[in-house]
Amino acid sequence: MQITITDVRKRYGDVVALDGPSFEIPSGSTYGVLGTNGAGKTTLFELLVGHDRPDEGRIEVGGLDVAAAGHRVRERVAFLPEHAGFPPAMTGREVLDVHARIRGLSARCERIEDALETVGLSEAADRAVAGYSNGMGRRLGLASALLADPPVLVLDEPTAGLDPRGVATFHEIVERIDRETDATVVLSSHALEEVERLCDEVAILDDGRLCAVGSIDDLWTAAGDDVTVEIRPADPAGRPDRPRERLLETVQRYGDVIETDDAIEVVCDRDEAIALCSALDPDLLERFEVREPGLEAAFRAALGTDERDGTNVDPTEVSA
C-alpha cells in the first residue's frame, strides 16, 4: 500500500518539528527514514499512524487521508514504537489475545499462532512476559503489530537496545516479511548498516526538512565516487625503518589523509586508489583494504557535511 506525504508541517510551540517534507513510499517496499536527533522522524511516524494531526499538508495511506480517517487508519497501519511494554504477569499468548480482542479480529487463535511463528516465539508463548529477554519483548511487540495482517507496518527503532543475536533475529524477521508478504514496511534506525541491509529506499530528514530521498544505490551515487583506502602499518617495534612515517610520505599525494591510532585512511577517487595500492611497500604493511562509499557517505553528503571538515555527523547520533 503506497504512502504519500505532501508538504507536511508540524510545530510544537516555537519548535518546528516538520517543515514541509514531501515524498512517496512505494507499495510493498521496505523504506528507511533517517535523520539526526531532532530531525522529525518520530513526529512523522506519529502523524503517519494517526496519533497526531499535521498543522498543514497531508499524509495518505492507500489514498486514505490519515488525519481525516480516525480509527480507520488502524485498519491499515500497525505501529511498533521504540518503547513497547506489556504486563509482566501475562504470557505472550495472553498479550496477543488481548490485542486481538481489542481489534475485534476473527479467527483469533489462528492469527495468534501465525504471529508467534513469524517472530519465533511459539515455544515461549505460554511463559510470563516477565521472563522475556529484551529481544523477545521486541519480537512480541512485532507479533502484536502483525496480528491484523496490516498492509503497512511502521517500526520505530526496532532493534534499539538489542544484543547482536537479537538484532540478527529481528533482521531475519523483517526480511521474511518483505519476502513473503505485500506489506509496506517503514522503519527508522540509528544503525546505518541496518537501513542499508533492510531498505529499498531511504528518506533523510534534517531539522524537519527533506534533505534527500531515493534508492540506496542512487544515494550512493549522489555521494560521489571517492573510496577510502585504509592502511594498517606493520608493528613498529624493533624496526628502524619507521613503517608508519614512510607510508605517510607515500600516500600524501593520492588524496585526503586521515590518521587514526591504528591506521592511515586515504580518501581518493578510484583511479587514484589503484595507483596508491600499487605504490605501497608490502614490507611496511600489516594489511590494507579499500572501502566503497556506503550509506554513511550518502548521509553526510545529504546533510552537507564531511568527516574531514570539522562539521562531521557522528553516525551513532543518527536517531529519532
Image (cartoon, rainbow, N blue to C red):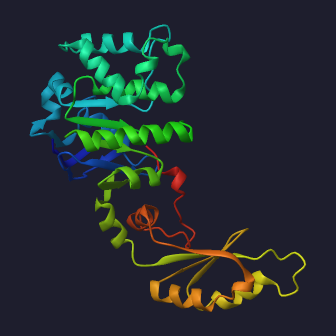
Q: Which residue is the extreme one toward the right?
A: 238
Quadrant (top left/top right/bottom left/bottom right) for the C terminus: top left
Quick one: 215 or 106, which is closer to the camera?
Answer: 106
- Let me know if residue 13 appears in the view: no
Residue 262 position within the rendered picture, expressed as x and y whole percent measured from the top left: 72, 68
Residue 187 position within the rendered picture, expressed as x and y whole percent measured from the top left: 35, 43
Q: Which residue is the extreme one toward the top?
A: 89
> Residue 189, relative to residue 107: is it above or below?
below
Residue at position x 35%, y 37% from top? 155
Quick one: 6 or 223, which is closer to the camera?
Answer: 223
Q: Count how many numbered circles sit on residues in the image.
A: 0
> Residue 92, relative to residue 154: is it above or below?
above
Residue 78 position within the rendered picture, expressed as x and y whole percent measured from the top left: 27, 29
Residue 252 position within the rendered picture, expressed as x and y whole percent measured from the top left: 63, 88
Quarter where residue 267 is shown: bottom right
Residue at position x 38%, y 65% from top? 302
User: Seen in the image, is 275 located left or right of residue 239?
Assistant: left
Residue at position x 30%, y 43% from top? 186
Residue at position x 65%, y 88% from top? 280
User: Seen in the image, is 148 located left or right of residue 89?
Assistant: left
Quadrant (top left/top right/bottom left/bottom right) for the N terminus: top left
Q: Which residue is the extreme one toward the left?
A: 63
User: Seen in the image, is 280 located left or right of residue 49?
Assistant: right
